[in-house]
Image (cartoon, rainbow, N blue to C red):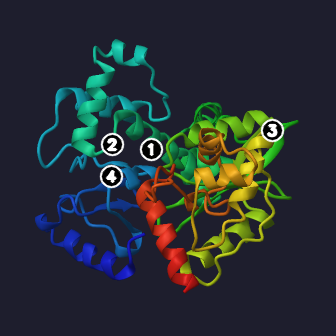
Amino acid sequence: MISISKSKRYYQALLGKDSDYEGIFYVGVRTTGVFCRPTCPARKPKFENCEFFATAKEALLAAYRPCQRCQPLSLPNQVSHVIQTLLKAIEENPEKRWKDSDFRKLGIDSATARRQFKKRFGMTFVEYARSRRMGLALKHIKEGNMVIDAQLSVGYESSSGFRDAFSRIMGAPPTHKNHVILKAAWIDTQLGPMIAIADETGLYLLEFIDRRGLEREVERLRKKLKAAIVPGENEILKKIEFEITNYFTGKNLFFETPLHQVGSPFQKQVWEELQKIPTGETRSYFDIAKLIGKPKACRAVARANGTNQLAIIIPCHRVINSNKELGGYAGGVARKQWLLTHEKKIQK
C-alpha cells in the first residue's frame, strides 16, 4: 500500500508529467476507471480521485483498465504485434478464461505469448488475464454495492450479461436461490489487498487476491458447499477485517474469528498443528510430519500446507525447509519473509 506522502509526491509528478517517474508508478483514476503512466497527456484528475500503484498488475487487480491515450502497457518502448493483439482481445472480453484453442484462433503460439508477456510486463499472459478478470469481480466486492450497481459499474447494460460474466469469474451468479449464500469482502493490507469469504457463522477463505490459483480455490469452495458467493458484509467479515488490521499494525497478532476449515481429515490435522506454532517461530515440514505422528509424510504435509485457504490465520508461512531456507509460499516468498520478520519484531 502506497503511503499518503508518497502518493502526494506521485501526484505532483503526474501534474508535471515527470518522465523520471516512468515505470515507478501507475495512477488509477476512479472517475474514469482507467490507469495511466505519469506522463499521460489527458486532463489531470483531482488528487482524491487518484489511486497509485507500483505495478500494472496491482492496477489491473484493482479493476482499472489501460488508458487508451497513454497506453501504459505499450510504452515507452513499443511492444510486439503479439502483445498488441492479445491486449486488445482481453479488453474486448476481459472476463474470458483463455484456452490453447483461443490462441490458435488468433494465430498465436501460447508459449510465445507467455514468454513475451513475462519479458515485457513481469507476468505471464495467463497472470495478466487472470488479474484483469479478478479485478472486475473484486471491484464490486470492494465497493460492496448492490448487484445492479456493480453491473453498471463494469459496463454491462444487460443484467443477464453481467450475471453470466460474474458466473465465469467467481463460479456462481451474484444471487442464486436455494443455495448457501457466502459473502465476500475486500480487505486492504500493507502487503496488498486480500479477499475474505464467510457466512454468518465463520470464515471460509482469506487470501491475497493475486495468489496463484485463487479462482480455482473459490470455485472449489463454491462447489463443495453448493454456494453462491456475493459481495456483502456480515459480523464475521467485520471481525476478521478488524483483526487483520490489528495484525498488520502490530497491535495484536492473534485471531479469534470463527473458522470453517474445508478439507480432508489429514489436511485438517496438519492445519491444526500449524496453529500451534508459536508466533515468531518456525517449523519444518518434517517437524510437522513428526508432530502428527507421520514422519514419512513430509510431501503430503507440504501439499496440505499449500492448500490452506486461511492465510495468516492458519500460519502456513511459519513452515520452512529443514535447511532453514524459506521454501515456497502461495502468496509469494517476499510476503512470507515480511510476515516472519513482522511477527518476530512484534514478539520482541
Which amino acid type corresponds to the residue marked 3 in the rendered image?
Answer: Leu
Q: Quadrant of the N terminus?
A: bottom left
Q: What number of labels is visible? A: 4
Q: Nearer the viewer, residue 311 or 348?
A: 348
State the separation of the CA atoms marked 4 and 3. 34 Å
Contact flag, marks 1 and 2 (Cβ < 8 Å): yes
Determine which quarter of the picture holds residue 109: top left
Instruction: Pick the residue in front: 7 or 323.
Output: 323
- The earlier-in-sequence mark between 1 and 2 is 2
Q: Give residue 3's position: percent from left, percent from top.
A: 38, 77
Q: Which mark is residue 17?
A: none
Mark 3, residue position = 225
Q: Residues within 10 Å of mark 2 (few under 14, many from 20)?
A: some
Instruction: Identify residue type, mark 2.
Output: Met
Residue identifier under label 1: 131
Q: Are marks 3 and 1 in contact (CB under 8 Å)?
A: no
Q: Which residue is mark 2?
A: 123
Q: Is 42 on the left-hand or right-hand side of 201?
A: left
Whichever of callouts 4 and 2 sits on the residue coming sooner in the sequence is 4
Q: Earlier in the sequence, mark 3 or mark 1?
A: 1
Give how far across and how far down residue 221 sits, in percent. Answer: 72, 40
| Cα–Cα gap, marks 3 and 2 | 32 Å
Q: Tell me which amino acid carries mark 4.
A: Ala
**For mark 4, does the 10 Å Cα neighbourhood hold few (<14), some (14 to 19), or many (20 or more) residues?**
many
Per the model, the C-alpha gap separating discs 4 and 2 is: 10 Å
